[in-house]
Image: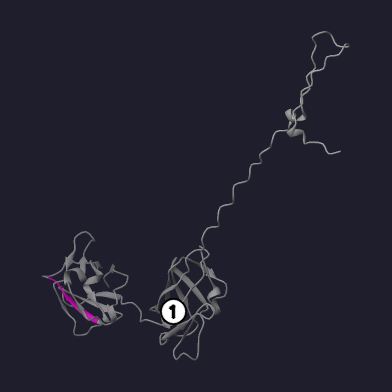
Amino acid sequence: MKHPHPSAVRLLFIIHHSSFSPGCSLILSSPSAFRSRRVTKTQAAPAPPPPPPPDPATMQSVMQGGDPHAILVSFSTALSGFANLSTAFEVSEDGVSWISPVTFELVTPTQATMIFPVNVSASTVWRIPNPASWAFTDGATLDEPFAGTIAPAAPQIESVQFTENTFEMRVMLSTAVDSIDDLGQALQVSPDGAEWWPATGADLSDPLHLLFDFDGDLPPCTVWRVASASAWNFPDDQHLDAPLSGSIE
């Protein structure tokens, strides 16, 4: 026999029987009145998405380091080190025979000097055999370019010297200068670092060894400075590099 579902039936029985006291009523309700409450389960919040990977690192410049055993390398992201230096970087004179550095020195977090066991001042090209050998602080991977040409070393003032003339200074350069826009900003000298005398003339006939003139006899000067490196013009749009001040020899 098929019974109706308890939730669809509501029964009310009022039974009068002689065994009950007069006027006594018995009320029976259907089981639907005692239905269990629905339990709502709270779902856990979804996990946040993982952070995006860091931007890839790239080589910014490779140039001669001034020292014949050094190459200066710049990159876009702070370097933490190398998994294998011998496969991280190589230089060559002809693109056939390649030389790896034996050690390196961090100049800044994004610039390193690669030091080689032999003279590499004649090297013209560089390459990265294994980009995975580079390790960066933010976990970035090294992206192209993985090869290129080596630029000449940035121009520098190697020394500022006295001459036999009390109104003149000799400046020795690492790279031949093309021209100077503002002599007074290009070189200044001082006896104490407080009061400065600007240059008023210059002889550039030897572009590696310049003679700067000053108005009148100079006091016993001890230090020099370049007030504006942009006053110096070098081939290939190179910029005068540090040091931009020092002692007079």
Q: Which residues are magenta?
A: 209-214
Image location of residue 217, percent across then percent down: 13, 70
Please say whether residue 33 is visible from this viewpoint. yes
Task: Tell me where residue 32 sits by quadrant.
Answer: top right
Q: 43 and 227: which one is in front?
A: 43
The residue most toward the top is 22
Q: Amino acid at mark 1?
A: Ala
Q: 6 and 146: which one is in front?
A: 6
Colour scheme of the picture: one colour
Quadrant of the frame with the C terminus: bottom left
The residue depicted at 47 percent of the width and 79 percent of the height is 146
The residue most toward the right is 19
Describe residue 109's horizontal placement relative to residue 3 as left or right.
Answer: left
Magenta-drawn stretch, dominant element (helix, strand or loop): strand
Describe residue 41's horizontal placement relative to residue 147 as left or right.
Answer: right
Q: Quick check: 197 above or below 150?
A: above
The residue depicted at 83 percent of the width and 39 percent of the height is 2
* Within-10-Å neighbours for mark 1: few <14, some 14–19, many 20+: many
Q: For numbered disc 1, what is the local secondary structure?
A: strand
The residue depicted at 48 percent of the width and 82 percent of the height is 127
Image location of residue 164, percent across then percent down: 18, 78
Q: Which residue is mark 1?
A: 70
Image location of residue 26, percent across then percent down: 80, 17
Describe residue 165's horizontal placement relative to residue 223 as left or right.
Answer: left
Q: Quick check: 50 above or below 45?
A: below
